[in-house]
Amino acid sequence: AIAVTVICHIAAMLDCRICTSDVLGQLFGTVDNPVPGKQCMPASQTNCLGRPSQQGRCFRKRSQEEMQATVREWEQEVHNRAAMYFSGPGQLRNVLTKIAANVDKEDDPVQGDEERCVLWHGDRQYGNTYVSAKDLRNGQHQATPNHSDQPEAVFRHVKPGETDQSISYVNRLLAFMYADDESFEQLMWLPKQPFRMSCGNQLCIQNAHILQDV
């Protein structure tokens, strides 16, 4: 009975609280493959609020070998609820690989220092506007009155049993995969929105920074 209850809440836990009909027409894929050398981003994208030591740091992607090693370590700590949900061949590994591909090689939202922010370098959601990491890197998105909402870390993926891509908040996905049962039950009662982060930076995806209240 407990397993059935958990599965019934999974879709609500992961869904982005926006209308996805428009953004699904803009198929900007998340960059999965490592990029040789350093891939520098503007300081505004590399700055993790509240963590001066990370300001202006260049985004360094993991190598293929580093990516595989990180994903193997993360897989070992995934909660059973996530293992049950992403039970198809390669499903769990694909999701973890996307996450690992969009954080700096020195950052770890699962096993890293809990005091350290882990900045998301992937796609973002500004209110109802979805902006791909590609557009961010090319400088095609600028802060305007229409994009004044605080950015949220998101990415596209095809959920098990579905054929169309969906948008999920990264911090909700990480909580689903790694929160203990007590924390997960509390989080499921919160509004269907991205979770607030204790560091104040919604682009930080450090699992330990997720607040269990509104």
Image: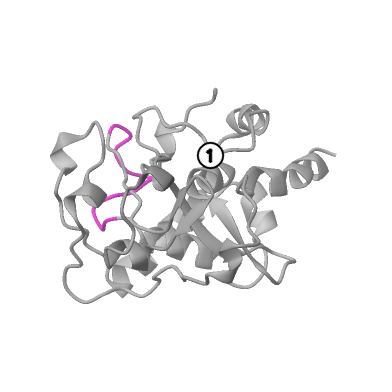
Q: Amino acid at mark 1?
A: Pro
Quarter of the N terminus within the rendering: top right
Is 100 positioned to the left or the right of 38 in the image? right
Q: Which residues are magenta?
A: 104-115
**Residue, x 27% and y 68% (percent of image)?**
138
Towards the viewer: 28 or 176: 28
Instruction: Specify the farthest residue to the front.
Output: 145
What main secondary structure does the magenta stretch of the protein show?
loop
**Residue, x 55% and y 48% (percent of image)?**
173
**Residue, x 28% and y 64% (percent of image)?**
137
- Percent position of residue 151, x then y: 41, 44
- Percent position of residue 86, x then y: 64, 60
Residue 81 magenta:
no
**Residue, x 42% and y 32% (percent of image)?**
197
Label 1 sits on residue: 194
Name the secondary structure under disc 1.
loop
